[in-house]
Image (spheres, rainbow, N blue to C red):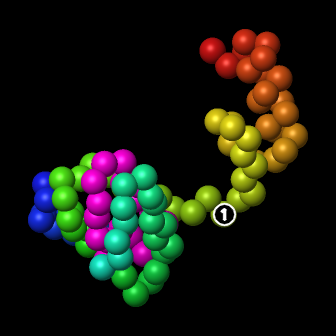
Amino acid sequence: MPAGSRFAQALPADHNAFLYVYRGALQVDGRSVPMQRMVIMANDVDRDGVVIEATVDTRALLIAGRPLAEPIAQYGPFVMNTEQEIYQALADYREGRLG
């Protein structure tokens, strides 16, 4: 985003979102987000979006989606539902079975 620009993004009330600034700095709904920082936006039934303003030339990544509502286990790049599934994924990786 060019410095001084403003962007409004609709986000459904049933979605969570996060925004990561990888170059520059932003204001997200009036909150400062410097480079290499992230802002997490939880779903809010009273809101329908977010306003993003670039204070300098900026690059950022905005990701949104519905909450999974299921358990999450994470180890390195592996994300599964249980610790046992993580162990299996690691074994599959070590054996070359992940493609």
Image location of residue 46, percent across then percent down: 40, 87
Q: Within the magenta stretch, is there residue 81?
A: no
Magenta range is 11-29
Secondary structure of residue under mark 1: loop
Name the side, left or right, on which 12 lies relative to 75: left
Please identify the quadrant where the C terminus is shown: top right
- Residue sitting nearer the eye, 39 or 93: 39
Residue at left 46%, top 70%?
A: 41
Image location of residue 73, percent across then percent down: 75, 49
- Outermost residue, bottom side: 46
Please identify the quadrant where the N terminus is shown: bottom left
* Residue 97 quadrant: top right
Q: What residue type is labelled 1?
A: Ala
Up/down of 82 relative to 71, above or below: above
Image location of residue 24, percent across then percent down: 28, 54
Q: Mark 1 points at which residue?
A: 69
